[in-house]
Image (tube, rainbow, N blue to C red):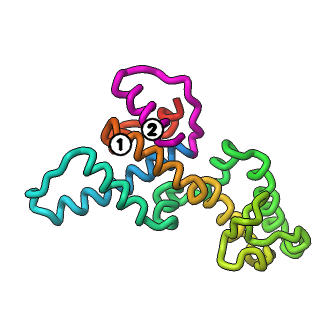
Amino acid sequence: YFPFMGRLVAKALSDGRLLDLRLSQAFCKLLLACCNIILKNEKSNNSSEDGRHTSSSSETSSAMLNYLIQVSDADLWREFSDGSPGLGMLHGVDPQLAASLQSILDMLSNDSKSAIGDLCLTFVLPGNECVELVANGKVTDVSGENALEYVAAVVRYVLCSGVRRQAEAFLRGFGDVLDIKSLLLFRADELEL
């Protein structure tokens, strides 16, 4: 579905049409983060090449996305988050999860670190024990000492790592119609449509 959605959005942009399509602001911001990473890579490659190599736009789009697949989740998160923890953006995606994580942060600030262990949490994605947020996450208990790391890992997975493949598929479809970098003409709230 995501490659088709990318094609649909690109075609609507090229035809100057409006779509009644609600993409989350977090997803739009992730798309822009991916585009920024691609642009930075392209700039560094252009400065190291002498400009003799030319290729078609479809080959270029494919090469850009192949580079993006190689980028680490940590690098993508840095580009996505701009240094902010992302809990506010998580509220727009999953308000209940954001409130639960905020409660853990409140417990940390209220000197209730020992009570965090009583929650019996492990480093797995809430609601999906198959997704370990760290190595051996199923057996790593969340405590007052690592609760901040747990909250950050959940936010990072839900907003970035967990939907990265969908964003890449969307961009692959978008790149079939328009240059992927054309998304950089917009802000995340403008792409939200």
| Region rendered in magenta | 1-26
- Give percent across and percent down for residue 136: 70, 79
Residue for badge 1? 175
Name the secondary structure under disc 2.
Answer: helix
Q: Residue at x 19, y 59 (%)?
A: 46
Residue for badge 2? 6
Which quarter of the figure has residue 104?
A: bottom right
- Give percent across and percent down for residue 101: 76, 58
Q: Which amino acid type is shown beneath numbered disc 2?
A: Gly
Residue 4 vertical placement versus 130 (above, below): above
Q: Residue at x 80, y 77 (%)?
A: 141
Name the side, left or right, on which 49 lies relative to 37. Answer: left
Q: Residue at x 38, y 29 (%)?
A: 11
Q: Do the numbered discs 2 and 1 sit on residues whose CB atoms are within 8 Å?
A: yes
- Counting the numbered discs, the total is 2
Q: If the image is split into quadrants, where does the N terminus sit? A: top right
